Image (cartoon, rainbow, N blue to C red):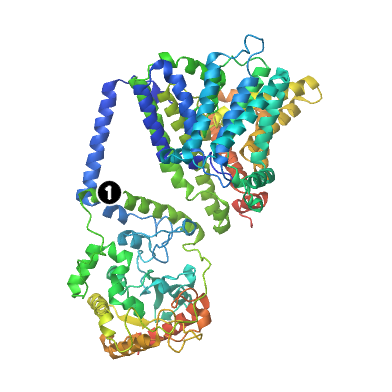
Amino acid sequence: MIGWDWLTDYDYDWRFILRVIAKAALAFIVINLLFAVCNLTWWVNQISIYNGLVPGRERLPYGEQAEAYNLTLDSLDAMFSTHVINRPKAENEFRVVVIGDSSVWGVLLDPGQTLAGQMNALDLQMADYHYEFYNLGYPTLSVLKDLLILERAVQYQPDLVLWLITPESLHRPSLLDAPLVQRNADATRTLIERYGLAIDPNDTRFVPELDFFGRTMVGQRRELADWWRLQLYGFDWGMTGIDHVNAPYDPLTNDFSEDVSWHGLSPGDDLQSQLALDVLDAGRAITEQAGVPLYVVNEPIYIADGENSDLHYNIWYPNWAYDTYQGIMSENATRFSDAYSSPWDMILPEHFTDSPVHMDPEGTAQFAGALSGAMMGVLFP
Amino acid sequence: MFTLPDDQFMGLTEITILLIAAFAYILIVPGRWRGWVLLVGSIVGMYWLFPVQNIRWLEYGLATATLVITIVSWFITRPTGKRARKFTNEDRLVVVIVVLMVLAFTFAREVDFLDSLISRPPPLPSVAMALLVVGMLLVLMLRLPPRLQMTFGLLAIIGVFIVIRLPFLTTAAAAFLRQNAGQDASLAAPIDIGWLGFSYVAFRLIHTIRDRQSGLLPALSLREYLTYVLFLPAYVSGPIDRAERFLEDDRALADTRLQDPHRITVGLSRIGVGLFKKFIIADSLAVISLSATLVDQAGGAGSLWLMLYAYAFRLYFDFSGYTDIAIGLGVLFGIELPENFNRPYLKQSIAAFWQSWHMTLSNWAKSYVYSPLSRSLIKQRKLSNGQIVMVANLATMVVIGLWHGMTLPFLAWGLWHGAGLTVHKLWSDRTRKWYRGLRDTPNKQLAWEITGVLLTFHFVLLGWVWFALPDLQSALSTFSRLLGGGA
């Protein structure tokens, strides 16, 4: 064996093999115990090549397309450690965090075309401050998921939080459908308890707490592999600036049936009880505690003009439900110190893509322009 | 685009199963049965590893074709002389075993367990009929003179190789096979025919035929020959052993002490190192390696260089990792396969690189392309020595290039290395005396050695651009961008 003298020259016996097996077994047990007892995965997730060796990501990791150099993670630590927000704040930086659903994250948009990207492109300045917008949107419709992210986001010294909502993300029974919420059960339960949210902390949708084996290195292999893949994808992200592939999509439905129910509710039913306004209150409490203004925005929706469009705005929303929601939000605007706006119908239907809240680059740019004006109005009335 | 040596067919699961099989073999199989177990195991393993094809029954058909081609090759490479060419009882028994196995695998249609082993075999009557036709053709071949049999066999193997490596011929063959299988011929594509391990099988067969023609091949029984060609650890990714060397180990199997701590430690260590190289290093580097997609997406020259370095090391760790696994498994089974790599990226010249990169392929090409061609050119006395070296180097490297795939980028890669070897030869001939003089100045010699390593590595590195990209246009534009130019 050429070049393998270091291996072949030694005279091995059975005792040697037993010693190797014993030492390997011991090392294996010790490492697994360390992982289980000291939560080493948490430490691993703090390590990141992003914002150092490679640029930080402009939005949170999400997706399962290898060609997009992206993946969906469960660990908020790992997710935030990759984000460009995880860098020192410049002295003259006015840091604005934008949270919300997939429309904020920017499905079918490049990083620079998202709402935060377009607002950055406006190059907003005020006095000596330069506005930097950070996209902390994350796909799936759940304000509880947004709250989870918001709680982290305030640790990164924001000067303003923009929170984009829509009735679907406020629908209380669906709050726990977001995988990120289900897989961060402990953190979510803490929020439920701390802010007295009307959500069952023992809901079966929560992923059960990890047992001892689940916390070992073997049990954590998926988490560790994800972390490793995320670091490797960092090089691809750094080289290409790609974190999402715009796949072909079906155009939005423009014609609807006469059925006007919304999540089993009919006109006249109690809609307010189905909307998780208490989660918005919790968000306000978090930002107040951090001394950061919060600006809640009802995001634009697609407005159809096809069959039965007098009954439905779009595939998600029957008119009565959306109008009732609008009324409830207006009545509750004081909850947000009037830092609430609803430019719900400002974007023309042709600027929506594959969902009633996903806009194309032009629609997003229009929205960004309008939102930045409104934001300045709130900040400097 | 070039894919690494059939690696998708030898994942961790397959390697683990082979490892378990190796230990069962070490612990259970008596010495005298080892050769037979290796043969049967290799045949079963080949059918098991064959990937499912787009064309109905093709994976079964290709695995069976590999067996048939190998048996025919054994048949035509038997030594001349009436006594030597006689079938022994062992040979007859092997034929019976192989035929029974091929027929038995058709029952995978009915038995769930076998179904996971051999996917989608054709019905038994069709296979029996096909085997009958093959048998009749073999009988007809018996009537040909041995020399003609060998020439015919050699051309047939090269012909099959060209068909499965030349995209338009592969497509045509796929269309033909699709039509016969009652499938839409218009959907035919080169990926329809994925003949697992045939590149390596073909090189082994050509080696035995050429060595028989030159009288160098020892007499091999059918069992020995089949085991040599199909030996499972080396079937998918090599190395390309020589028959006479393999034979030594095979014939010593009965007396080889397999339950030996030294052997087990060495075998397992090689497998461990191989797994680390392949599944940790190479698979990680794969994410950032040069590829057509990344080249299109990437920004500046720095990114391209990073991808290129990643590609070079990925290729090395992937291929040498597989070789380590194959060698380690071989050691456990009692067969010491030859080395394929010897720190190639640390060599001081391109000639030394080729003596340490995919060594078994380089040696094969040297034996069956470079040396015969050089001898023939020298005999003709039409070219100068320098011209002979150039022609032989270019031809050899072109053959190696086209072995990877018959496309223009591989041709360019072969020419690149052929040119490199020629320039190196001319340079070293002229500087030999001066280089010897450096021995008196160690610092100068060290500096020159480091320069040699860096130059050689970067020459090889740039060569991988041809290798990694699917067409000449993208390769040329990548060269331009690497050097700071536009696309």
Q: Residue furthest front?
A: B125
Quadrant in which residue B438 is drawn: top right
From the viewer's side, name the closer residue of A367 and A266: A266
- When the figure is inspected, residue B285 is found, relative to residue A118, above or below; the finding is above
Dot 1: what SS? loop
In the displayed structure image, the side of residue B427 where residue B245 appears, left or right: left
Residue A354 locus on image (x, y percent): 48, 73
Residue A59 locus on image (x, y percent): 41, 66
From the viewer's side, name the closer residue of B346 and B129: B129
Q: Crowding near pointer 1: few (<14 within 10 Å), some, many (20+)? A: some
Quadrant in which residue A341 is drawn: bottom left
Quadrant in which residue A379 is drawn: bottom left
Label 1 chain ID: A
- When the figure is inspected, residue B390 is found, relative to residue B180, above or below; the finding is above
Residue depicted at x 78% and y 19%: B379
In the displayed structure image, the side of residue A69 where residue A74 appears, left or right: left
The residue identified by callout 1 is A219
Q: Label 1 sits on what residue type? A: Gly
